[in-house]
Image: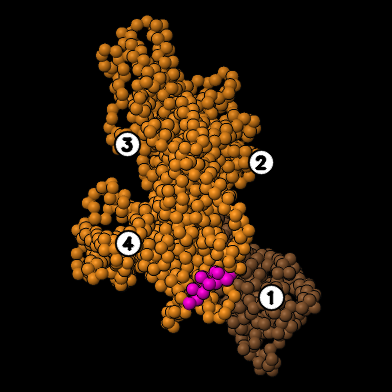
Amino acid sequence: MNVLPFPGRLLWKQLGGAFSPAVMPSVNLDQIANQENTMKDTDIKRLLYAHLLCIFSVILSTFIPSLFLENFSILETHLIWLCICSVFVTVVNLVLYSVVKPNTPSKRSSLTHKVARFLKCCIYFLVSCFSFHVIFVLYGAPLIELVLETFLFAVILSTFTTMPCLCLLGPNIKAWLRVFSRNGVTSIWENSLQITTISSFVGSWLGALPIPLDWERPWQVWPISCTLGATFGYVAGLAISPLWIYWNRKQLTYKNN
Amino acid sequence: MRLGSGTFAVCCVAIEVLGVAIFLRGFFPAPVRSSSRPEHQAEPPAPEPLAGASSNWTTLPPPLFSKVVIVLIDALRDDFVFGSKGVKFMPYTTYLVEKGSSHSFVAEAKPPTVTMPRIKALMTGSLPGFVDVIRNLNSPALLEDNVIRQAKAAGRRIIFYGDETWVKLFPKHFVEYDGTTSFFVSDYTEVDNNITRHLEKVLKREDWDMLILHYLGLDHIGHVSGPHSPLIGSKLSEMDNILMRIHTALLSKEREALLPSLLVLCGDHGMSEAGSHGASSTEEVNTPLVLISSAFGRKPGDVRRPKHVQQTDLAATLAVGLGLPIPKNSVGRLLFPVVEGKPMREQLRFLHLNTVQLSKLLQENVPLYEKDPGFEQFKMSERLHGNWIKLYLEEKGSEVLLNLGMKVLRQYLDALQTLSLSLSRQVAQYDIYSMAVGAVLVLEVLSLLLLSVPKALGPAAELDVPLSSPLFSLLFCLTLLVLSAVHVVVCTSAESTCYFCSVPWLVASGAVLLMAALLCAIVSAVSKTGVSTKHAGKNLAPSSSQWSELDLLILLGTAGHVLSLGASSFIEEEHQTWYFLVSTLCLALCQQVYRSHFLGNKEDPQCSSYADPGLKLALPTQRDRAKGCAVLQDNGAHVATSAFEQLGDAERWMALASPWAVLCCCRLLRALNQTGVQGAHRPDLGHWLTSSDHKAALSVLAALSLLTIFLLVQRRCSPMSKVALALGLLGVYCYRAAIGNVMSPWQRGNKDISKGIIEARFVYVFVLGVLFTGTRDLLRAQAAAAGTRARPVGLWEIHSGLVLLAALLLRPHNLPVLVSSLLVQTLMAKFVWKPLSHDAAEVTVAHYWFGQAFFFFQGNSNNIATVDISAGFVGLGHYVEVPAAFLTTFATYVGPILWASHLVNYLSSEAGSRSSLRHACFCYALVGSIPVSAYIILVTSLRYHLFIWSVFSPKLLYEGMHLLITAAVCIFFTAMDQTKLMNS
């Protein structure tokens, strides 16, 4: 059986490798349940701090550049902001996931394997950027004008969605498909990943709505409203997911078994 | 009585059509119009009445003024001139108003207080309704009789500077003009400087008779910062200065001229306290009207409040002042103070001309005009006038003449007032009562449809429609009584002139009966669902989590589209909404396809790629049995995956690629026709193709498209219709070659362009032939009662007949739209709908969305100007109303019609459940009627919106037309369903 880089190591071992969430564990001792709950709470706490750091990085990316760059504003020097925001979020994500380590290190931890894995991640990221770009064009973005803007939008959307996936799940398409199908999540990290990713997509989707309005505001220009929508969606997802998981933690323990 | 949900939906949509028709009739009151066209204007002016003999004065009276300058200041409110602001910022004008030789009035504008209708009102004297726009098919030029046209015909030289609207309304009427756009609202200095810079030169010149200046700056300030902004003051002083310059220049010129000149200061509409305009508040309606001329007597300085007059009165006054006939459709009356200084005979002559014109208009528009008090007064004053002339010609004593003259004068003025009032009352208001009746009917139908969703989408697809019990219930009788009482009260109240009161009482009582019956049906449906939810209340909660993404998207998309209709920009850019929704739909389908490809073969906990809200609501027993998603997995996801697994390898790849192919198709089509308002000017492929330089490319494209159409359509046709189709498509190319759209390969150098009547009729023969074959096959299959396989063949032939007709009517550069619509239909049916086994409701909504998107892909928009009228002349030598209207409608709605006909084909060729056609019919009726009903409410509440005539009203007409198409489609569905029932 193909072993996925699987989160929630302890749970996994305790449940004797019951992979599928649909299969209910037959042994459900009180002791295990208690342990599980405390695990859950500490995990949720870590998740919350991690997400707060991510939100902080997004906010910082709007303020720090203005200290070094003259005439910096999100709307007027939008492309610069996009780059900076994307870099900030990437760095913070990488650092966070390497510190928190919610996922199992793979069995083969040789250097070549790590390098190969890293290269694979880079390729995946680039592919996701280009496919987002293609989707935007299919959605009606101009083909030739504003290529750079469209591409940077694709980059920032990839940063919000593909990057955390790569950090958490690695370059493993099967795991991605599992996480993003219904009832497929197996840990709170994956659950929060699902929420932030979907909210980023929904945010950028909603961001396209005000473009046809005739208010003639600077933020209605393609792709500013969409990038802002994606950012707001990402931040909202980050803020909501720990809370949502906390509130639903009773049901989630069942689901995630 | 038990009804199939399809039949039920048809009944509902039919009632809805009736409701919308009543609403439209109330929303667009018929305008007051003279029947004679403005082209035949050789009509001599009415001669002076004379008792017994005929008068010697039959020509028009000479002009009163040599030069006329009209200074129109946009959004000039009456208190800007006559109020405290006027005293403070417009000292010169105030001096003229109070002490100078001038007449000042407060002119009332009628809503919509928007510039273009107001200019029309000022120059034609009529009250423009939206129906004019339809009648002229949005040709921007003003075709009605108006002062400018008359002046031009009389050889006056007119110069215009200001708002572009004038240049569009009166093309080629001005000897010199400079239009400024009112596009940049934030600019309020440049727009006015662009006008003022010409003044210096023009005022020195002698080669003009009429000068019109339209200043926009004040309006822009109002829009940006409201009527109390400090900018208003400086703008008013600027305007005051301009007025002074013009007045002094005119006065200095007058010394050489024989006749005095006239300076008119007016506004087109006012400004609300918020700074906008369009509605009917006092601030928006009242505008100043100041007439300045040395011909008027100087006033002794008594400051009275200016008299209230109508804005339409200016047209008649200007016509009289310039010695022109009064515009035929004018409902205004001459501003009497202007002619007060003239001799009695001339005064009476002017008043007589005006009264004759008004009474003619009355005769043509009011059937019982003889009973109108105005008309009686007119007849009496005309008789008195004749007597007076007789006395005058006999040169009786001046005292008697004067007294009698004064009497005639008063009589005339009374008659004018009454006539003008009764004419303008005909058009001024929305007919709220008819609108309310229509809206109530439509809303009742919609709520009935919504309430019956769970039943109608249930597995039986049948509804209980209790006919007898509600009809005799107490509630029904009470409602009927109340509604009849309301009808009688409204119709007998004195000042109402509404359409719904003037229909025959049988029709009216029928409508009232319908309203009451619908109300009872709603009440009984509500009570039933209340009972059933009480029973099944426990089970309703878990079902919501089982909705698939597609269902969620469909719901959100429908709701979002309906909400977007409230914003004018979203209506202008509605195509963007549909493109966006269709793209999202493709992505959602893509996700489903990928999921069933990659996860389908695993034992996988996904609950449903298949969910039917109606089914779930209607199946409480099954749900009881089923915990979580077990049942749905059994009958839904499992079926889906197995159906998907049946596909071969190549087909699997096709299934994975087809959503992307559809997306690419849509993106290419987007580039074909730019539509809407913001993007309309952008270059697109359609323009590139139609330009004469690229005729070769267009010809190749058209030929290729026709070939592809043949290849796509022929696979399911019988050999006979294959041949007919091929010949028909060849005929389409011949037709396009004959009228010179594409190059013809066999007639090189033959340049003469015919109307292509023979070719087009050749195609029509095949269209009819194919349609006939299809219908015959259908009927034969029905008669044979065994041929469940023959029926789709007949249906497909009907579809291909429609495709052939579309190919003929669509312009050649739009043939790719047809091709890709066929391509997308085939791809989706084969690789998405069938393998994923979506249920009828989802497929129907998806087809509806695609139909809407293709409506816009072919270049349509929510503006009347984009309707391709040339389609109505294909194969017709001259204009014949019924076929032309039919062909134009078909060509405009090709997208929705073809997608609906494909839906019928798909659903009846699928040997699915018996009820799928009924489900589809019901869903189609529902998604078609939700936007219309919501839009009717929106339009009613926005009826004083700034863009009501330019944006909302055309959309209302489109919605009405679309509902008609929906009704036709639903009838087709039900007919198919009935034949199917007879077969089985």
- Where in the figure is residue B91, as x and y percent of width and height? 61, 31
- Where in the figure is residue B590, as x and y percent of width and height? 50, 72
Question: Callout 3, which amino acid?
Answer: Pro
Query: Chain A, which colour?
Result: brown
Report the side of A229 relative to B252 (left or right): right
Question: Nearer the observer, disc 4 or disc 1?
Answer: 4
Coloring basis for residues: by chain
Question: Nearer the observer, disc 3 or disc 2?
Answer: 3
Mark 3 and mark 2 lie on one chain; the one further toward the N terminus is: 3
Quick check: do tags 4 and 2 share a chain?
yes
Question: Callout 1, which amino acid?
Answer: Asn
Quick check: do tags 2 and 1 share a chain?
no
Which structural element holds mark 2? helix
Colour orange, chain: B
Mark sitting on residue B983: 4
Which structural element holds mark 4? helix
Mark sitting on residue B230: 2
Mark 3 and mark 4 lie on one chain; the one further toward the N terminus is: 3
Residue that badge 1 annotates: A256
Q: Nearer the viewer, residue B28 or B904?
A: B904
Question: Nearer the observer, disc 3 or disc 4?
Answer: 4
Find the magenta span and give its range: B629-642
Q: Is residue B474 above or below residue B801?
A: above
Name the main secondary structure of what is drawn in magenta: helix
